[in-house]
Structures are given as C-alpha cells and as structure tokens.
Image: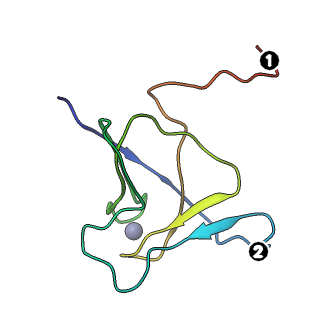
C-alpha cells in the first residue's frame, strides 16, 4: 500500500486563545508518539522539521482554530487541505 506524506502548514502562534486551540503532546512522550493514529495511507508531518504528527490518516482537512504543536521543534502546525478528498461544503452543495 502506497504511503504518502503531507507537510502541514506552519502557522504563527495564535494571539487569542479563544480563536485557536493548540494541542500539544504530553511530556515526556515516546519518540514516535503522534497526535492521531489511524489506518489510512497519509502521514502528516511538521511543516518545519518533518516529524510525523499524525500517522496513517485517510484524509487531511483543515479545521479552523485547531493547531498542533510539534513536540520536536515547537512549531504550530495546521492540517493542510488534503489532496485526497474534499468534504463538500453543505452551504454550496
Ligand atoms: Zn517540528
């Protein structure tokens, strides 16, 4: 099965904690620990250092206000719009 890697987008630290929630792994965590582990083909990696943050996802979707802090380099990462599959917007059909 083909695995593919999607680099997440590094974004600025949110100023307002009301607008964005930054998830972080507990410290210490295992070297290979990821935020999510699934059964798909996509590994999402930190856009700065390349560490795997979400493993084996089926698809990747940007969720506004949801960010993930890389345990290796501390960058804030946002899931990028997946090349795999777009969820249709119910407002536009
Ligand atoms: Zn990183």
Residue at image position (35%, 45%) is 38
Task: Using residue 2 as the reference point, say whether residue 57 is left or right of it.
Answer: right
- Kindly indicate the quadrant of the structure image that contains residue 87: top right
Task: Using residue 10 as the reference point, say whether residue 91 is left or right of it.
Answer: right
- Circles 2 and 1: CB atoms closer than 8 Å: no
Q: Categorize mark 1 by other alpha carbons within 10 Å: few (<14), some (14-19), many (20+).
A: few
Q: Is label 2 in a helix, a strand or a loop?
A: loop
Placement of the N terminus among the 4 image quadrants? top left
Tell me residue 89's x, y (percent). Answer: 72, 24
Establish if 74 lies above or below 41: below
Placement of the C terminus among the 4 image quadrants? top right
Residue at image position (43%, 57%) is 47
Q: Which residue lies furthest to the bottom in this view?
A: 28
Task: Using residue 79 as the reference point, say whether residue 88 is left or right of it.
Answer: right
Provide the residue designation for mark 1: 92
Q: Which mark is residue 15?
A: 2
């Amino acid at each position: 099965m083909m695995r593919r890697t999607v680099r997440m987008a590094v974004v600025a630290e949110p100023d307002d904690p009301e607008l964005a929630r930054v998830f972080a792994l507990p410290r210490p965590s295992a070297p290979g620990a990821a935020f999510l582990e699934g059964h798909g083909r996509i590994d999402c990696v930190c856009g700065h250092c390349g560490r795997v943050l979400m493993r084996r996802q089926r698809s990747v979707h940007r969720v506004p206000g949801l960010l993930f802090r890389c345990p290796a380099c501390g960058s804030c990462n946002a899931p990028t719009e997946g090349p795999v599959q777009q969820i249709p917007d119910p407002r536009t059909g």
